Amino acid sequence: GDGGRAHAATPTAAAATLVVAKDGSGNYTTVQAAVDAVPANNPSTVTISIKPGTYRETVKVPADKPHIRLAGTTSGKNDVTIVYNNASGTPKPGGGTYGTSGSATVAVEADDFQARNLQFVNDFNEADSGITDKQAVALRTAGDRIVLDNIGAVGDQDTLLLDSAGKDKVGRVYINNAWIQGNVDFIFGRASAVIDKSAIRLVKRYDGSSGGYVAAPSTAAGKKGFLFINSNITGDVSSRSCYLGRPWHAGGDASLDPQAIVRNTDLSAAIKTTPWTDMSGFSWRDDRFAEYKNTGAGSGAASTDRPQLTDAQATDYEIADWLGGWQPSS
């Protein structure tokens, strides 16, 4: 009828909302099927509304599908779970292994992506002795203007990969009211990311040991790295066992200038009194690591091992400095 002709006349327009439900009560039963239904070069926001449940699948949002918003239908962080268990060393069906970035449960290469009210999980079992490369990403983003609001990102090593489309590209990410859990380098990459009002949780390794690094930025020179602000960092780990971060010079690239700033954040006793450390022969002191007005048992006074911003410097390390004119909206 007429409806069919009208639809055919506008092939680039997707439905404004697509519903995913495990029980068949929506338009799709998997998240990937809904993403696949969004047309290439999609011009305006498409909401993929996901009903509560556990969706065991990998999801890829390709670069030519911007303006996708994944949204759980409840206000909880963990009523909707997207989970898979690939690790860097997991064999691929066609040969080879996934590698760290390829291990992501959800991989987002598009700009203007939003996720709300759901959790991204990688439940790879680190005790699997058959796989030595145990990095296992829950969520990887490589676009610009990414919003993650009221979400969970749960894993062990390399949980949340916040990247950009290239070393010369800006990848701005705004994370608000999130729960981010892991142990080794579990927030990493070259994005310019704000982690605001979030709970960062350190967990023990699979062998029961404590030890890890919250952040492993691989920021390019002249770009902004990771800004942790108004958050809290705690964990069920031994006292003084974990670092705030270390500089990831990906591929041994000496031109990188990794940056992590932790400010106005409550640090538990899990954090070492010397919170930064070197990585792969690169000294953290040559890169950009600092704190400002942190509180809690894991905070400490300024020292050569613990650089603090001055009040004057801190005015250049605000959320607006990171977002650069972009105002994330809901």
Image: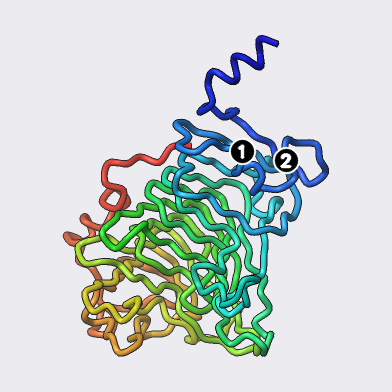
Q: Position of residue 258 (x, y in %)?
A: 29, 71
Q: Position of residue 114 (x, y in %)?
A: 50, 45
Q: Which residue does the numbered mark 1 point to in the structure image?
A: 37
Q: Nearer the viewer, residue 145 or 205?
A: 145
Amino acid type of the residue tagged 1 in the rendering: Ala
Mark identifier at residue 28: 2
Q: Residue at x 29, y 55 (%)?
A: 169
Amino acid type of the residue tagged 2 in the rendering: Tyr
**Residue farthest right in this picture:** 23
Q: Nearer the viewer, residue 254 or 81?
A: 254
Q: Position of residue 62 (x, y in %)?
A: 49, 50
Q: Quadrant of residue 312?
A: bottom left
CA neighbours of label 1 inside 10 A, class few (<14), some (14 to 19), many (20+): few
Q: Nearer the viewer, residue 180 or 114?
A: 114
Q: Is residue 38 left or right of residue 85?
A: left
Q: Position of residue 321 (x, y in %)?
A: 26, 51
